[in-house]
Image: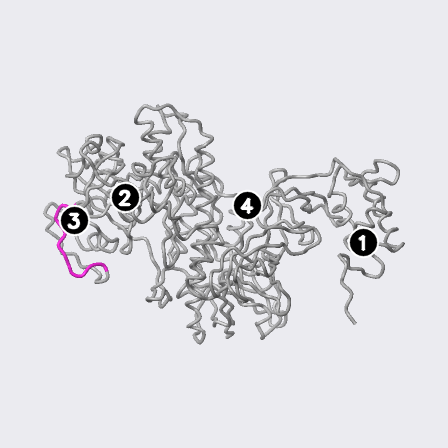
Amino acid sequence: MTKKKKGIFKKKGNVVKDLTRNIFRVLNEDSEKSYNHKQIAAKLKISDTDGKNQIIKKLAELTSNKKVKEVDRGKFQIHVDRKYSVGTLDVTSNGNGYFITDDYEDDIFIPNINLGKGLHQDTVKAYVYKKRSGKKLEGEVVEIIERAKTDFVGVLQKHKTKPFGFVIADNHKMYADIFISENKMNGAEDGDKVQASISDWPKNSKNPFGKITAVLGKPGDHNTEMHSILLEYDLPFEFPTEVEKDAENLSLEITKEEIGLRRDMRKDLTFTIDPKDAKDFDDALSFTKLKNGNFEIGIHIADVSHYLQPKTILDDEAYERATSVYLVDRVVPMLPEMLSNGVCSLRPNEEKLTFSAVFEINNKAQIVKEWFGRTVTYSDQRFAYEEAQAIIENVELSDEIQPYTMPVDISIIDKEYEVATEIVEATLQLDKLAKMLRKKRMKQGAISFDRVEVKFDLDEDANPVGVFFKTSKDANKLIEEFMLLANRKVAEFIGRSKGKPSGKTFIYRVHDEPDIEKLTSLENIIGKFGYKINTETKASTSESLNQLLSDVHGKAESNMIETLAIRTMSKAVYTTQNIGHYGLAFDYYSHFTSPIRRYPDVMTHRLLQHYLDGGDTPKPAPYEEKCKHSSKREELASKAERDSIKYMQVKYMQDHKDEVFDGVITGVTEWGIYVEITANKCEGMVRIRDIKSDYYVFDEKQYAIIGQSSKNRYQLGDVVKVQVKKTDLERKHLDFNLIEE
């Protein structure tokens, strides 16, 4: 005997469940059409008298509270005064959602049953109403205006006997599996990691229909997973053939005519300082000691805009990518390698076309003169940060500096080499000036987020065999300060005129003030550890945040509190509307120094040259659109980079399941505690149900779980011991067992 198919309603006794929602669903199919109770019953497949009577009563109730209107006797229609809004749907990992719209101050909760086939980040139309139980608002998605994405990466699970399967998306916010008929599987086998595209979502189906557009390989395979991360965020991992050909056809010759159009700085002492594994060098510094005792310092940037011409295939591709993507084991460049690592890279002992900001600076780090324009330069030496740091740490700045024999890591070069006296002096003097510039910045209210970066030692097959932490030292800060100087001064040069905004269209990198609610939440959390911040004024907020970051440095809770502090900050974005940069304490700030890897820097170069040539200000609208695109692509790249780190952390922990680690509780929820291992910054979850010593209950106010019998408490920031219980590479998730003492 076969089982009857379940209808769309569940019944408790004779009461039809979710009747209000489903009446609205019928009426919303055509908001200008009216329906009687029989037509609604037919749509809902309700044929019994009791069910029809419930519809009649519900329609009367909805009419009395003006949610529907009776347009003719027994004929009902959606009320025009219903509170509809358009906004963005934010789906949570538990399958519910929040409706984000400018029409309401707070986000509107949308239960899973009211999502109306809306997916994460979709632009939707929603009906907002008050819950019966109180004043809280809820919402219901009534229309999908625009899908945020239709392509998803996941694993194909074929039905064992029938000609179809489902793609289970890797993205935990994708709550519906994608139905794939056999003729749309594109050769994929059961268990393959694939990319699937949604083509349709029938009204009566709980699953969207789709087709497989790419077969990536088997889950767990390293390249498969890296490509999956890129595709999940719509990031390409190779260049189209026509783009590569366009790059190959570029003229690479630096002609006498071109040099004649530029400031020739080839004889100026010039060098680069970059990570030891860097392949693209888009910035260099030049240093000259002037007769008046001041210093001429040039910040030279690869002149990408000379090669990347507007309205070309190459430029279109660079704009579409908008940024290079830095995964743990690879770089996905914005420009083809011929440009990024070749002609535009400021490699040592090669002449290069550059765009420069040149400053005369006195010994108090004050700017005496400034100049901006196109140049031709020659890099005399390439340093890794470690090498420059060795000079800073081992040589004193004096009038009689001797040539310096550089001790270097054998992995950087094969032997020790001698660095010229001039370069040693330049490095030390630049370091001294950089420290002055940084001190001024901090005094003006800049916030110092010197976070530790997690890095991996990889073997030949890109497997993680070790974890190390990268910290910012004096050599890193030297480069950072001069890049910040160039970015700020370029923005001031264009954006300000006689102390007032110039009104010229330009590309700014802006950063709004912190969210006051998030700051309040941060205050509550850090108070548990005995820390405080003062949010009375903008200045006191910056000062106390810096003090907080200094106080927690090196403590067990440092990474957690630094992360929480960063989350109070607004996101930095690109725009033509300048509001300044809060985190850096700059009134004017742009991105000028990395055009090899950031498209906004290319736009900055083009606009700067346009104004240097005496051009009028162009209309801002096209540039604002490009800024929004660039900001969005940057955010996607950041998510992919974070996912690649999580993937490597899980992969690394697979080989350490027998070890016990010290960790810090970084999060507390009703289902468990998050623990970050101190030694490698890998984070995982201890589920409450796996703690066997007692029955633990979540205490939201105390950021803790508390044992009912023992009253034992595990609280945010506590140091605990954990052991790996389970590693899930596909979900990039770690489960820990708590080692109870």
At horizontal 54% and vertical 50% (from top left) the residue drawn is 521
With respect to residue 134, does 175 lie above or below? below
Amino acid carrying label 1: it is Lys
Residue 396, which numbered label? none
Residue annotated with mark 2: 344
Task: Find residue 585 and report its horizontal and vertical position in percent.
Answer: 39, 39
Labelled pair 3, 2 in contact (Cβ < 8 Å): no
Q: Which of 644 and 701 lies nearest the eye of the viewer?
A: 644
Amino acid carrying label 3: it is Val
Q: CA distance from mark 3 to mark 4?
A: 49 Å
Q: For mark 3, give the secondary structure.
A: helix
Residue annotated with mark 3: 424
Q: CA distance from mark 1 to mark 3?
A: 84 Å
Q: Which of 645 and 146 lies nearest the eye of the viewer?
A: 146
Task: Find residue 699 and report its horizontal and vertical position in percent.
Answer: 60, 61
Q: Assess disc 1: are there few (<14), some (14-19) or many (≥20) residues with their C-alpha within 10 Å of its C-alpha.
A: few
Q: Assess disc 3: are there few (<14), some (14-19) or many (≥20) residues with their C-alpha within 10 Å of its C-alpha.
A: many
Which of discs 3 and 2 lies nearer the camera? The answer is 2
At horizontal 82% and vertical 50% (from top left) the residue drawn is 42
